[in-house]
Amino acid sequence: RGYCTLMAPAGVSTALITPLLLEHVNINIPDRGVAREFYVDGLGARLNSVSTNYRQLHVNLGLSQFHLLTEKSIKSKEPVTVPQRWPGRLELLTTDALVDVRDRVAAMGYACHLHAPATHEGKPPALTIDGPWGNSFTVYCTSATIADAVTSAGSHADGTGSLIAMSRLVHNCRPGNAPVIAAFYQQVLGLRVQQTLGRATIQFNADMPGVPAQELVLEEHEDAPEVDAYDKDESAAVHVALYLPSREAFAAAFDRCQAAGLIFV
């Protein structure tokens, strides 16, 4: 719990902006064969052969990626022995029928469940999956029209497969901490944040016709990792990369981070 007030350096704009893209989620993995089978053959992501190398797999889903590292760093070349787990759920969009995704993933031994639409809540059919190393996924089916828009917008090397978007990342946080995290995204990174009780939501807009919006949701939960888990627990040290819409927005966010002593290499 806490309260955060950070002042922008002189001359730095404090106007809040909408970020452009949730570009990738990085998860360390101990077995690239298992990861490739699940993410590519199971979910339908596309292997990026250009940026995949001896220490990492990169898989494309539309404009976004999963970075799946088997070595902790280029310098140490230390192999990953502790798999990482996203503390919440990763929501994805596919053009495949959900029953087909279910059948592929279930054949690999992963627990999954098809959920009927909850029309009174405006929720479409969904497929929940307990994936490798404790990571949880929710997959929704989307239209060919949206898939065509994503394809037209371009992608990483090797394009995209049937898994076409990272639509929402729900990251659990400790009770009472959503307002603190919201303050960081607003006051330091300069982003618009929607706040409700126990939740902070950052919306992303690629500003490309037909390309679906994205959300990063910080949601309070009793089972969330401790606030310092990233520094103390290797399994919790995942990261997410986001894109800002302009050089000016990036420079302003950098200056505020530097003023707050948050820049490290």
Image (spheres, helix red, strand yellow):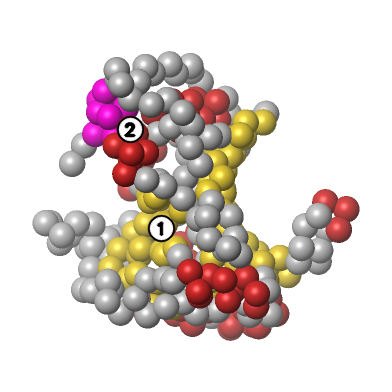
Please report the bounds of the magenta region as a residue range.
Answer: 254-263
Front residue of 9/59: it is 9
> Number of numbered discs present?
2
| Residue at numbered disc 2 | 252
Depicted 116 relative to depicted 241: above or below: below
Dot 1 or dot 2: first in sequence order is 1
Using the rendered view, name the quadrant where residue 221 is placed. Answer: top right
Q: Magenta stretch mostly in which secondary structure?
A: helix
As shown in the figure, which amino acid type bears the numbered disc 2?
Ala
Left or right: where 96 falls relative to 171: right
- List x then y, in percent, for residue 237: 36, 47
Depicted 220 relative to depicted 26: above or below: above
The secondary structure type at the circle numbered 2 is: helix
Residue 137: assigned label: none
Q: Is residue 235 visible to the viewer in this orientation of the structure?
A: no
- List x then y, in percent, for residue 142: 67, 71
The secondary structure type at the circle numbered 1 is: strand
- List x then y, in percent, for residue 122: 81, 55
As shown in the figure, which amino acid type bears the numbered disc 1?
His
Q: CA distance from mark 1 to mark 2?
A: 22 Å
| Residue at numbered disc 1 | 24
Left or right: where 7 falls relative to 181: left
Using the rendered view, name the quadrant where residue 247 is placed. Answer: top left
Residue at the left extreme, as displayed: 75
Residue at the right extreme, as displayed: 120
**Few, some or many C-alpha atoms within 10 Å of disc 1 (few <14, some 14-19, many ≥20)?**
many
Residue at 40% x, 34% y is 189
- Image quarter where the C terminus lies is top left
Whether the residues at callouts 1 and 2 have beta carbons within 8 Å, the answer is no
Using the rendered view, name the quadrant where residue 119 is placed. Answer: bottom right
Q: Is residue 255 magenta?
A: yes
